[in-house]
Image (spheres, rainbow, N blue to C red):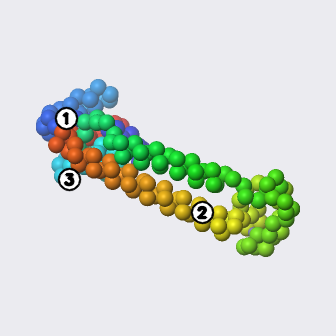
Amino acid sequence: MENNKEFRTFPDIGKDAITEEVNDYLCSIRSEGLTEEIEWNEDPVLDSEEEAVNTLMEKEDVPVAAVRFYDYPETEKSDRQLDLEYMYEKQKRAIAKTNETVHYSGDNMKISKHTCKNCGSSIATAYIKSNFCPVCGADLRPDSVIEKQEKQVKRLEELEKKLHDEIAKQREKNKDSAVVKWLVMLDTE
Ligand SMILES: [Zn+2]
């Protein structure tokens, strides 16, 4: 199926008014207006526009579908969120650095051969350009380095969860000032 889906956001002005708007819009871009009924999904009111987009994407076989979502006012990020974002980015860089550092290479090791623990190949360190065995693809680094990296990844996941929780907490606080809107996905073909 051709993908000609388009998303349009509307304030909660009522189904008739939205239907009219969608029809007018379609008339302006193609030869005919709405040819199918809009599938209205009033509940649940989704937590963000992003979630609304994802929910509608799952309805790709429905020609015109609509869901409701909470649109939150722009508010300043909390200090905790800023801190967490900073730590998250820092941790991501640390992991990238661990991954980029080639552990065995002619430059930083005196030994000239390294034996792969997995396949037993003896590899000249001068030819080692990555952390993976050129013969079997196994990670050549010592367990201590691999463990360090696993810990770093675990820490990153913890930070991500905390960040997610903090954003959810702030949202909950601002829920009273959130406005319900409709997101309509239409087939423009
Ligand atoms: Zn190997």
> For the point 25% across and 39% down, which residue is it?
72
Marker disc for residue 44: 3
Q: Is mark 2 within 8 Å of ligand 1?
A: no
Residue to which mark 1 is pinned: 11
Element type at mark 3: strand
Q: Quick one: quadrant of the C terminus?
A: top left
84, above or below 71, in the image = below
Name, please, the residue furthest toward the top: 28
> For the point 14% across and 39% down, which residue is it?
15
Q: Nearer the viewer, mark 3 or mark 2?
A: 2
Residue to which mark 2 is pinned: 148
Alpha-carbon distance for marks 3 and 2? 43 Å
Residue 42 visible in the displayed image? yes
State which tag comes first along the sequence, 3 or 2: 3
For the residue pair 86 and 140, the one nearer the viewer reads as: 86
For the residue pair 3 and 136, the one nearer the viewer reads as: 136
Amino acid type for the residue under numbered disc 3: Pro
For residue 19, side relative to residue 99 (left or right): left
Q: In terms of image quadrants, where is residue 105?
A: bottom right
Q: Residues within 10 Å of mark 2 (few under 14, many from 20)?
A: few
